[in-house]
Image (spheres, coloured by chain):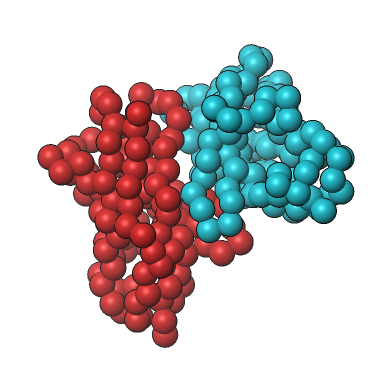
Chain colours: A cyan, B red
Amino acid sequence: GAVVSQHPSWVICKSGTSVKIECRSLDFQATTMFWYRQFPKQSLMLMATSNEGSKATYEQGVEKDKFLINHASLTLSTLTVTSAHPEDSSFYICSPEDREFYEQYFGPGTRLTVT
Amino acid sequence: GDSVTQMEGPVTLSEEAFLTINCTYTATGYPSLFWYVQYPGEGLQLLLKATKADDKGSNKGFEATYRKETTSFHLEKGSVQVSDSAVYFCATKTGGFKTIFGAGTRLFVKA
């Protein structure tokens, strides 16, 4: 089956610093990448959608200057949380969509804690 | 816009009990329907899916039937195990675009 990796799986950072999360599709190519965040005991909230080589489209209420998304290749996308604050602490999940079958797969998630 | 409503949890059952988690959806067009499972501390895994009306998705003893007339996709399992304890998400996806998730239902199974 399709394998998606995220790195790091867990990160603690200080308020004001930036954190980069990598998402890789290991055995398929993804034209489209979805980034979600999940608060404790809540559902997934779509943050943004990106297509390879294009700028990301952000959902309403999501600050594009704070959550920088780069989708430079068909197998790698990154989410950078800039100037992180404690309220950015959350579980971030990437979801690449297989370009051939349009199946959406999910990474294992990255737990971000901002102190 | 598209939306998914699923029953609130938590749901607590004894081992070998019958499980039903209700899910209804609103969507334009002809959506595909999914159930995802999230075990403690892990990411989402696709449990089963159905792509058209009357299709039945099944996996690991779980089943769900795509009912267009009632816009439902209820999840069932005849005999739950402790290892089924997790959060279950119903989801819809239309036209190859973004997936919309329900709020999730937490299931606890007691030995």
**Which residue in the rendered view is the most extreme toward the top?**
A54
| Residue A37 locus on image (x, y percent) | 60, 43
Task: Give the side of residue A82 with respect to residue B37, left or right.
Answer: right
| Residue A6 locus on image (x, y percent) | 69, 44
State whether residue B15 is above or below residue B83.
below
For residue A31, which quarter of the picture? top right
Task: Give the side of residue B81 with respect to residue B29, left or right.
Answer: right
For residue B49, which quarter of the picture? top left
For residue A3, which quarter of the picture? top right
| Residue B63 locus on image (x, y percent) | 27, 56
* Residue at the spot 20% in from the left edge and 41% down from the top edge: B71
Task: Give the side of residue B49 with respect to residue A42, left or right.
Answer: left
Residue A3 visible here: no
* Residue at the spot 73% in from the left edge and 30% down from the top edge: A66
Residue B91 visible here: yes
* Residue at the spot 28% in from the left edge and 77% down from the top edge: B17
